[in-house]
Image (spheres, rainbow, N blue to C red):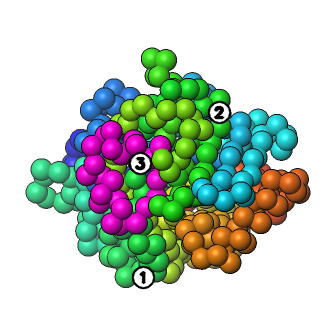
Amino acid sequence: MTNQSLIRQDVDISIIGGGMVGASLALLLSSCKCGWRIQIVDAQPMQTTQSIDGLESYFDARSTALSQSSREIFEILGLWENLSPKLTEISEVHVSDKGYPGSARLCAEEQNLPALGYVVENRWISSALSEALIEAEDIEIVDSAKIAELKAVKGGMKFSVSTAGVGKSREVNSKLLVIADGAKSETRNMLGIDFTVKDYGQVAIVANVSLSQDHAGIAYERFSDSGPIAMLPLEPIDGDYRASLVWTVSLIQAEKLLSESEDAFLKELQLCFGYRLGKLQRIGTRYSFPVRLVTSNEQVRSNVVVVGNAAHSLHPVAGQGFNLALRDVAMLANELAKAAVEGSSSLGEYSVLERYLDNQKLDQERTILLSDLLPRTFGNRALPIVLARNIGLLALDVLPLFRRNFTQLGMGLQTRGHELAKFRPLDSLVFDTGIRSDG
Ligand SMILES: Cc1cc2nc3c(=O)[nH]c(=O)nc-3n(C[C@H](O)[C@H](O)[C@H](O)COP(=O)(O)OP(=O)(O)OC[C@H]3O[C@@H](n4cnc5c(N)ncnc54)[C@H](O)[C@@H]3O)c2cc1C
């Protein structure tokens, strides 16, 4: 836990929320070598590999399917090597609709990609990020902390921070405040930033499942009457084949499924999913997450930027939330570093933050649309919609160009033409700016 009396009082960039997005941003900013004093403030204690066995209490069993764009960003941060032994490459994706003929198969080889995605348990991403944070000398970590009295002041933001068990708080001035404290962001609320919620009335049940046969790197997305079932291939443990389940169901179904015995749950899952992965043998702890599309009505203000789930929390069915947020924060770091190199604007200046948002707008809109359309299309059992989506799946299966565009979108590669090109300066800035900020 952080020693409160040592917390820095003047920082360049303060990131509230050190989840996967806030932590990635801190590392991206650090890699820009602009001499910024970076601070991460998180409500929870810091996690490391050493503490990983004890994480069950608040750590979820989620896995993330990383896209090619996320791989490239983690490579820039030097984290990919660490993650490689823990991840499973997706060689194929099978999409099908239970009880209907439409189905589609996407193949990495056909798309000339090393993989269609990389599945890794969140705990490994978090521990890789935490370890890199601890090593970064320009990043201060303030954990088990709570912020209050947040307000705009001349040239930045001011807030008080108190750490668990310590009565007295400490004041911090920051030129740029990054809000990264998740979909329910208290910090966003403190600044009166409104948000829009679209409640799908669904719950995502997440668990690890052991299988009687090897998944062969195939990820399955199966749409059934009870909702979409995603089975993502995971690394085996002690020879046990495993998949990561995300089953999106109605609130009533979720209540029933979560209270059922392991055997009854597996039986129901097997009935809806079928035997593509052989017999489903065991299931780990089941966790549930409400499924909502939450979008912040403002993402940038002078000296303030909202990122990650605090900016947009998506339906998990398309597996895009983190991948999009990582592209966002890479673009943000890039724009901030460019502005620092040019020296024509101060840190947190609205025009720079606005430029970041303009660059990411198209990517955000497309990805949010995809994540919103999929559950609405596949959750609907009305005959015209069923027909349309089965035609869509058949088209996806037989039309190579359609398949290619769909894969590129899912892998975060459609942005490359216009948007990712702008990432390039990051690559060069990452290692050679060598300048100090104005602070
Ligand atoms: C079931 C499921 C499956 C998913 N699968 C995928 C996938 O395959 N691919 C993909 O790209 N995305 C996926 N996602 C989305 C992805 O998990 C999220 O986009 C990502 O975790 C968002 O990270 P974040 O850091 O913005 O927010 P969070 O993970 O919510 O982190 C917020 C952080 O802020 C801290 N915090 C909270 N309140 C405060 C406060 N007041 N003060 C200080 N700190 C605070 C918390 O302790 C936490 O560390 C999935 C989501 C779900 C629910």
Q: Residue at label 1? A: 194
| Mark linked to residue 294 | none
Left or right: residue 271 versus residue 323 is left
The mark that comes first in sequence, 2 or 3, is 2
Q: Amino acid at mark 3?
A: Glu
- Residue tagged 3: 268
State the residue lying farthest toward the top.
238
In contact (CB < 8 Å): disc 2 and disc 3: no
Residue that numbered label 2 is attached to: 217
Q: Is residue 12 left or right of residue 82?
A: left
Report if residue 255 lies within the magenta region: yes
Q: Which residues are magenta?
A: 245-270
Q: Nearer the viewer, mark 2 or mark 3?
A: 3
Q: CA separation, marks 1 and 2? A: 41 Å
Distance, label 3 to label 1, CA atoms, is: 40 Å
* Main secondary structure along the magenta-highlighted residues: helix
Name the element at disc 2: loop
Q: Residues within 10 Å of mark 3 (few under 14, many from 20)?
A: few
